[in-house]
Amino acid sequence: MRGIEVELGGRTVLRDVDLDIRAGELLALVGPNGAGKTTLMRTAMRLQCARRGTVTGPTRLGYVPQRAEFAWDFPISVEDVVMSGRTGRLGLLRRPATADWRVVRAALERVDMDALRGRTVGELSGGQRQRVLVARALALESSMLLLDEPFTGLDMPTQDLLTALFAELARDGLAVVLSTHDLVAALDGSDRVALIDGGIAAVGRPGELRDPALWSRVFGIRADHPLLRLLAGPDAIGVDSDEEIDPGLRTATDPRASASGPEVPA
Ligand SMILES: Nc1ncnc2c1ncn2[C@@H]1O[C@H](COP(=O)(O)OP(=O)(O)OP(=O)(O)O)[C@@H](O)[C@H]1O
């Protein structure tokens, strides 16, 4: 994405977005409510027009919407939901062929849901539902997977399982992008994190984004917020010698930063 600007309801909700989404990486988008995370993903999918800027790369992207947006009370089986993910390839009228069912089975196996393929989706737990939606997106056989808040409402073991699955998919060569309000999951489980605040406030490896001032500015949190103490790490617990801090963890906004800090737009 280069120079992306998006207007919604007469308001600019994204501006100056330059972002590369790379094959083989797990990229987390974090930012407060209304920061533009979903809009950014919709723009990547070309579901949202940009007023300015360009999006290049594949047009057919696997998308996992927020779980609440899916009609779970519809009496449809797990495998039929996953097959619906192939509509982008099949068109609305062509009937699925054997090869399509093979792709669906492979997608279900990938998320470890093959044993439940005949179940009605309404009977599934939250974690199982999330995995069905991931399989549905995989059934499109796209090189990119976009997930909108996949961890919402899930317990920690289920989140861990999903994080491991997303990391595996990235290792298989997919570009995996997820938005989340779970900052620990984002910092702990992703290759890169982008802080969104109506644009890209910063993007880099988790270790490059430890400057509390950056998070305080993007999230508007108070100076004594526990997150900032956690991010500050050794500094916050009284370590004041330069030698005791890993230079790789310093950011561009830290006067002691190394040259290879995060990308912080001017
Ligand atoms: N259809 C729309 N018409 C007008 N404004 C919209 C529309 N959709 C979203 N917006 C506005 O665009 C901004 C970005 O919304 P978006 O849903 O992308 O944010 P988000 O970061 O995904 O938020 P959340 O974390 O709450 O899901 C918000 O201010 C929102 O109110």
Image: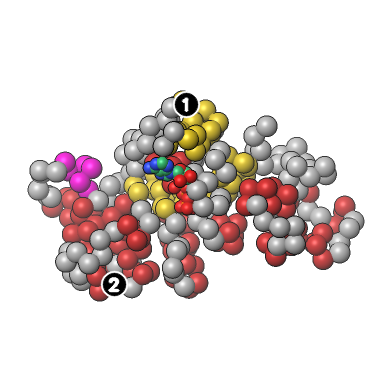
Q: Is mark 1 within 8 Å of ligand 1?
A: no
The quadrant in which residue 123 appears is bottom left
Nearer-the-camera pick, 73 or 129? 73
The relative height of residue 122 versus residue 183 in the rendered view (above or below) is below
The relative height of residue 139 versus residue 88 in the rendered view (above or below) is below
Image colouring? secondary structure
Q: Position of residue 127 (x, y in %)?
A: 38, 69
The relative height of residue 53 versus residue 46 in the rendered view (above or below) is above
In the current view of this chain or complex, which residue is farthest to the front? 10
Residue where numbered disc 1 is placed: 53
Q: Residue at x 42, y 59 (%)?
A: 150
Q: Position of residue 255 (x, y in %)?
A: 82, 42
> Left of 264 or right of it: where is 22?
left
**Membership of 168 in magenta stretch:** no
Q: Residue at x 21, y 52 (%)?
A: 84
- Residue 248 appears in the rendering: no
Q: Nearer the viewer, mark 1 or mark 2?
A: 1
- The residues bearing labels 1 and 2 have C-alpha atoms spaced at a distance of 41 Å
- Residue 85 appears in the rendering: yes
> Left of 132 or right of it: where is 219?
right
> Left of 247 or right of it: where is 132?
left
> What is the three-letter code of the residue carrying label 1?
Gly
Magenta range is 86-91
Dot 1 alpha-carbon crowd within 10 angstroms: few under 14, some 14 to 19, many 20 or more = some
> What is the three-letter code of the residue carrying label 2?
Leu
In the current view of this chain or complex, which residue is farthest to the right? 241
**Membership of 90 in magenta stretch:** yes
Residue where numbered disc 2 is placed: 124
Nearer-the-camera pick, 232 or 31? 31
